[in-house]
Image (cartoon, grey):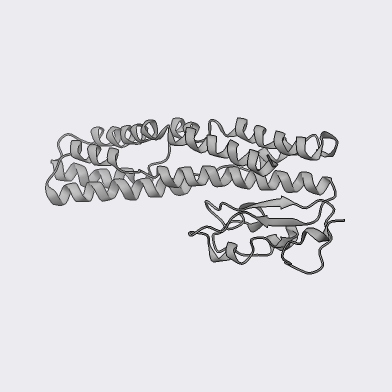
Amino acid sequence: MTPNQRVKNIAEDFAADLDGNLEVYKSAVIKMVAKEYYNLPPSLSGKERLNALITKIKNLKLSANITALLTGEIPAVLQDISGVWNEYFGEENVPPALYTSLLASSQVDFSAVNQTIYHTVKKEIQKAIALGQGFSLIQTNLNLSGLGWHQASTIANTYLSMFNTSYMAEVAKQAGLTYYLYDGIILKHSRQFCRERVNRVYTIDELKSMDNHQGLPVDQSLGGYNCTHFLSPLVNYSRKSYGEEYDPSHHY
């Protein structure tokens, strides 16, 4: 089994664990919204309270327990990923502070999820106002919605992938490697950006200069959010031209 296959298994296990917490996540968000609703002045009419709730939730932020739920397993998973590459390249090539420095310099930013939660809750409140429904029905409908979980899960898993690529590239650099294969399978939903690069050979600096139009660095995320492609370090490879198709005969 290749290192990237081992990392893929680690990431898939993490994603499955994350998905298993969906109900806990939704429950926590709904409790946050309910708390804001029941703290509103009881003198307001039902419609007035719902309108006031829209204003109250505008600055709603993920609570510490929800953030902990999303990020709780990440340090252990990152340690497992780094272990795979340390083993592959050999301990002597791994700078002692590499894992710690990469971990410290990278953070999972879930701020965009707050807006997704807000718009989802706002939509349900406005629907309830239009239909003359009460808050209990809003709670039911929110429980049936995603409440930003898909986006949060995407961010967490993309972060994991970015850490993996960054760690691998740094250790490969220490091992004296220069070239990387833009690796993986082209699927039906694969982005055109990836279709044009899969099975081609690049350096990290060349990848850094590219734009995947996802707002994420190509050298870490490749095609962007939820990209299924990965970089494979090429040992003893002599590239003949920029972005050439991978040729096994170029190994020496």
Q: Is residue 42 above or below residue 170?
A: above
Q: Position of residue 45 (x, y in %)?
A: 13, 41
Task: Please name the residue shown 57% across and 39% down the image.
Answer: 11
Dividing the picture into quarters, in which one does residue 20 lie? top left
Q: Position of residue 5 (x, y in %)?
A: 64, 42
Horizontal side of 188 relative to 60 (left or right) equals right
Residue 238 visible? The answer is yes
Seen from the viewer's position, the closer of residues 57 and 77 is 77
Quarter occupied by the N terminus: top right
Dividing the picture into quarters, in which one does residue 140 lie? top left
Horizontal side of 130 relative to 185 (left or right) equals left
Q: Is residue 180 above or below residue 26?
A: below
Dividing the picture into quarters, in which one does residue 102 lie? top right
Q: Residue furthest front?
A: 249
Quarter occupied by the C terminus: bottom right
Task: Please name the residue shown 74% across and 55% down the image.
Answer: 180
Counting the numbered discs, the total is: 0
Q: Residue furthest right?
A: 252
Q: Position of residue 203 (x, y in %)?
A: 75, 59
Residue 109 visible? The answer is no
Q: Position of residue 75 (x, y in %)?
A: 61, 32
